[in-house]
């Protein structure tokens, strides 16, 4: 929306000047802030579009997108004070909301899906220790499931019915 406003700046200015009682037009500082803010908001638009996909799984791409968003925000240089303030607040909010996502908090599904996705594996994690912890968690859970399954199979084998013979030679299964 802001990109379109900047594209229409010149025709919009002429139209506003031609109106007798038109609304107050943006001043040069406000135009500069708008131009400064567009590049830091663009990665949010890309991330929102990617995560809104209906025809492909999106859980595995959350961690790589959050990491890419953080890198993108840090690398942007703001020219205005308001742009710097917005950048700072966006980074603070991003960190407070997603700082533990690699560490399987609040839910382990994000990190597990990312690790199991062949596109990302361990490369998507900022800290290798987080990827190793997720890998260990998955391995432990699989080991537990396998041992439970084996125990269940062994108990089924030992529970085969016994045959007792009755006095008139008829077999009865108990």
Image (cartoon, rainbow, N blue to C red):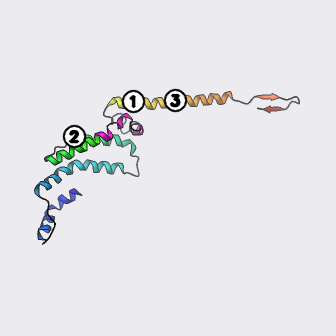
At x 16% / y 65%, what residue is drawn? 12
Callouts 1 and 2 close, C-beta under 8 Å: no
**Residue 52 is inside the magenta segment:** no
Q: Nearer the viewer, residue 104 or 56?
A: 104
Query: Mark 2 packing: few (<14 Cα in 10 Å), some, or many (20+)?
Result: few
Residue 158 appears left or right of 21: right
Residue 136 visible somewhere in the drawing: yes
Left or right, 135 with respect to 14, comes to right
Give the CA distance from mark 1 to mark 2.
Answer: 27 Å
Between the residue at mark 3 and the residue at mark 1, the CA separation in whole angstroms equals 16 Å
Name the residue tied to disc 2: 74
Residue sitting at 28 percent across and 42 percent down? 94
Report the quarter where the N terminus lies: bottom left
The residues bearing labels 3 and 2 have C-alpha atoms spaced at a distance of 42 Å
Does label 3 or label 1 sit earlier along the sequence?
Answer: 1
Question: In the image shown, does 81 or 137 lie closer to the viewer?
Answer: 81
Which residues make up the magenta segment?
Answer: 95-116
Residue at the bottom extreme of this rendering = 20
Is residue 67 among what the camera can see?
no
Asked whether residue 104 is drawn in magenta, I would say yes
Residue 97 x, y percent position in the rendering: 32, 41
* Secondary structure beneath label 1: helix
- Provide residue 154's location: percent of width, then percent of height: 63, 27
Q: Is residue 70 above or below residue 4?
A: above
**Nearer-N-terminus badge (1/2):** 2
Say which quarter of the image contains residue 168.
top right
Q: Secondary structure at mark 3?
A: helix
Q: Splitting the image into 4 quarters, where does residue 7 fall?
A: bottom left
Residue, disc 3: 144
């Amino acid at each position: 929306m802001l990109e379109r406003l900047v594209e229409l700046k010149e025709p919009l200015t002429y139209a506003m000047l031609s109106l007798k009682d038109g609304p107050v037009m943006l001043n040069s500082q406000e135009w500069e802030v708008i131009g400064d803010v567009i590049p830091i908001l663009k990665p949010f638009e890309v991330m929102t579009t990617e995560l809104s996909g209906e025809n492909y799984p999106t859980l595995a791409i959350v961690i790589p997108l959050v990491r890419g968003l953080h890198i993108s925000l840090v690398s942007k240089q703001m020219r205005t004070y308001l742009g710097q303030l917005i950048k700072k607040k966006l980074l603070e909010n991003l960190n407070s909301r997603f700082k533990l996502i690699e560490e399987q908090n609040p839910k382990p599904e994000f990190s597990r899906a990312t690790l199991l996705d062949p596109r990302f594996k361990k490369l998507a994690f900022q800290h290798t220790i987080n990827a190793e912890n997720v890998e260990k968690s998955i391995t432990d859970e699989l080991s537990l499931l396998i041992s439970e399954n084996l125990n269940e199979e062994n108990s089924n084998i030992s529970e085969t019915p016994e045959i007792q013979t009755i006095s008139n030679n008829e077999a009865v299964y108990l």
